[in-house]
Image (spheres, rainbow, N blue to C red):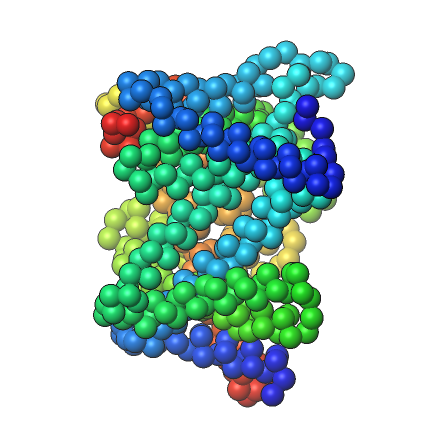
Amino acid sequence: MPTERIVVWIAAFCTLGLYSILYRENKVFRFFEHLYIGLGTGYLLYLTWNDTLKPRWWEPMVQEGRWWWACAVPVGLMFYTVYSRKHAWMSRLIFGLFFGLTAGQAFQRYAAVQFPLIRSVVSVPLVNPPEATAPGAYALSPYSAVFNNVLFLAIVVAVMSYFFFSFEQKNKAVASVSKFGRYVLMFAFGAIFGSTIMARLSLLIGRIHFLLHDWLNIAP
Amino acid sequence: MFTPKTGPELWLYIAGALLVSGVLVTSLQLVPGRLRKPLIALVTFLAGLFYIAEFFLPVDPTTRANFLTDYRAPIAQVNQVLLSFAVGVGVYSLLTLHTKNIVRRRQGWGFSVLLLAAMFGILVTGLLKEYRPNPINQAAFSLFFDGGLKSLDAAMFSIVAFYIVSAAYRAFRARSVEATILLVSASLVMLGQVSLGQGLTAGLPTSGFLSNLRVENIREWILTRASTPALLAVELGLGLGALSTSIRLWLSLERGSYFEKDV
């Protein structure tokens, strides 16, 4: 039997084995669940070596002669002191290093992503928007484009006011805006939920097509 | 001093770097208990300070960079390499747990054997495929990866389709205004995505005012015009939250069981 065919048979058994959970918790499912975790972990290790450590650490050190990369070994091993009560504080030192680096990166990311985002929100053109005259513009352009842009701003403000918890929203106007924000959020969550359902169903259709077409050869 | 080396000299330098850094790391244990927390806070502060200083220091107008900008890539590389070492912490935990299961013959120890065999199987065949590329090694890796992992991945995520339908049933019961809005929005998005739904308004013209009422155009409008600004506002809030949390972490002001533990 050619390798491709064996791969198809293994894939079919894996798919059916995992689907057996839909009936109830059983040993076949647990078998494939453990297989999945094992394969996933092994593949993660393979990727860690092949995509990160080999090209970014081992090759610069051994092939390009950058010997100072050897210092990464004792420093990297500090993570493993977490398993020793006596030396566990050293793992916090290396974790602290990463907290610091991650916090700094988060700050830069905020400056690079969020500031332009705020700018893009407040600079939405409300009069004569360019999309009104663009090819394939909405049928009611330019009025629909203006309406959409006003709505865009209104939704951003309303949703942000909904998430403003610093003081109680007693003022009627603020409470109404916040309520509108809640409704819009539900609308957005509904859209995300609908898209997620469709994405999962297309995955399911893909697996069923695989079983019927690739494995059993009974579907076109 | 930091110049690349070749040949036997390189291995000598690597051994020396290992020895010196190993001694330095080990000597950290000599730091008195009362100085350990301040040391952790200092390391955290200095690590974060690099990115903050790089952002605030004036840049050369022609290169749009300052003297720290050139170090961003090497520091990111060090970060990535050291984080890769951390992957082993999780793997070590998994190995310890399942090895104990096997040694003590706990219930279901056979599954632990399977897990470890699968883990080493895909790792070894993957490395063989890289370092000894031949049809046998590639086929062996394909059995594990294409036959096993890829299909298990797709099957596991497609199972969610069954559960999401039951979740949808509970979420979509129009008991309140919010639930009704959720139901209407999700239904329109789903209808606009499949040909069956698109068929409902297929009789409407494809251009002009009435084309806006075609279900696929309504879906497009919901996703790009109504849903996007709401999610943008959420993203702005998340960004602010991330910023404040990162500043708390950077200045070691964060509290909680991990941060307040004695060292």
Give x and y (percent) for residue B160: 38, 63
Residue nearer the viewer, B66 or B193: B66
Give x and y (percent) for residue B235: 45, 35
Q: Which residue is drawn at 61% across and 79% down?
A: A4
Give x and y (percent) for residue B250: 41, 22
Quadrant position of residue B115: bottom left
Name above or below for residue B219 compared with residue B263: below
Residue nearer the viewer, B6 or B210: B6
Image quadrant where one finds the N terminus of chain A? bottom right
Q: Which residue is drawn at 43% across and 68% down?
A: B117
Does residue B107 appear anywhere in the picture? yes
Residue nearer the viewer, A182 or A69: A69
Number of numbered markers? 0
Q: Residue furthest top?
A: B58
Q: In this view, does B161 lie to the left or right of B109?
A: right
Name above or below for residue A121 compared with residue B219: above
Q: In this view, does B97 lie to the left or right of A209?
A: left
Image quadrant where one finds the C terminus of chain A? bottom right
Does residue A169 appear anywhere in the picture? no
Q: Which residue lies furthest to the right in this view?
A: B62
Name above or below for residue B71 compared with residue A143: above
Q: Residue at x 67, y 35 (%)?
A: A66
Give x and y (percent) for residue B252: 36, 21
Q: Which residue is drawn at 36% across and 73% down?
A: A31
